[in-house]
């Protein structure tokens, strides 16, 4: 019998959108179907418990903490049919090729991770992972300010919106995150065209002004 066709599913969205719950739901279904499942999480995510996925509503699930994609590659067993990874955005970029390869091998790969950072910018390699996915489940949270649908993660430092260049780790400051909609999301000192950063990275202003034939490509 031909081997099953693999799939890569990415569960994404802001914080508090229910990504972990959805990952756990899919893992439970695979276990009911008597598949061989392995669940991993980034060792950087020590929010609650070092050997479990914990959701914000208190549901727990056993998961092996891993610190790199190389380590993860060693831990996945040859007969594992379903590989689930929590907080995938915290891994190194090697995770992208690994997920794609596992899916090509006929495995079911389900990963959950943030699509944007607190600035509302694409998070590291996540855009690549989303592009390679067979299925993307993008979830929205509820805005902590207005109750509307939220797709952004608001970072608050000592109760005020964090600035664009605020260091990721702040010692001694009371930090907190909440889900917000586009209207209520705030980033202090954001560059006026901050949300254009992705486009600028693809084409410099000089390239944009150059005729298409000089650029050698038409997009
Ligand atoms: Zn709002």
Image (cartoon, rainbow, N blue to C red):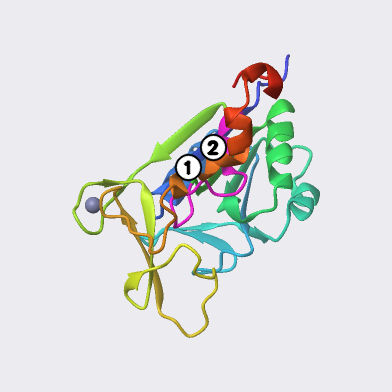
Viewer-proximal residue among 181 and 97? 181
Q: Is residue 140 visible?
A: yes
Q: Position of residue 180 (x, y in %)?
A: 30, 54
Viewer-proximal residue among 120 and 85? 120
Q: Give how far apart the Cα atoms at labels 1 and 2 are.
A: 5 Å
Quadrant where the image shows the C terminus = top right
Examine the image and state in which quarter residue 36 appears.
Answer: top right
Q: Which mark is residue 199?
A: 2
Q: Position of residue 163 (x, y in %)?
A: 43, 66
Disc 1 target residue: 196
Q: Position of residue 141 (x, y in %)?
A: 32, 49
Q: Are marks 1 and 2 in contact (CB under 8 Å)?
A: yes
Viewer-proximal residue among 212 and 59? 212
**Residue 98 against residue 170 in the figure, above or below:** above
Q: Position of residue 190 (x, y in %)?
A: 42, 58
Is residue 125 inside the magenta stretch? yes
> With 90 as the anchor, is 150 left or right in this view?
left
Q: Is mark 1 within 8 Å of ligand 1?
A: no
Instruction: Classify 10 Å Cα crowding around label 1: few (below 14), some (14-19), many (20 and above).
Output: few
Magenta extent: 116-132
Task: State the SS at label 2.
Answer: helix
């Amino acid at each position: 019998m031909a081997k099953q066709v693999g799939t890569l599913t990415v569960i994404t969205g802001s914080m508090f959108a229910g990504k972990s719950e959805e990952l756990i739901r899919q893992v439970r279904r695979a276990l009911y179907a008597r598949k061989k499942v392995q669940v991993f999480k980034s060792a950087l995510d020590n929010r609650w418990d070092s050997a479990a996925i914990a959701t914000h509503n208190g549901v727990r699930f056993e998961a092996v903490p891993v610190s790199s994609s190389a380590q993860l590659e060693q831990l996945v067993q040859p007969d594992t049919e379903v590989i689930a990874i929590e907080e995938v955005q915290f891994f190194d970029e090697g995770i992208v090729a690994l997920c794609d390869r596992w899916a090509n091998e006929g495995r079911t790969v389900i990963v959950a991770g943030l699509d944007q950072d607190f600035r509302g910018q694409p998070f590291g390699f996540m855009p690549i992972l989303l592009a390679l996915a067979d299925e993307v489940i993008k979830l929205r949270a509820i805005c902590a300010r207005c109750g509307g649908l939220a797709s952004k993660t608001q970072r608050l430092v000592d109760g005020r919106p964090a600035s664009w260049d605020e260091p990721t780790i702040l010692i001694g400051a009371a930090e907190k995150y909440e889900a917000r909609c586009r209207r209520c999301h705030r980033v202090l000192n954001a560059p006026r065209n901050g949300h254009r950063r992705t486009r600028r990275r693809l084409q410099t202003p000089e390239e944009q002004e150059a005729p298409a034939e000089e650029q050698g490509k038409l997009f």
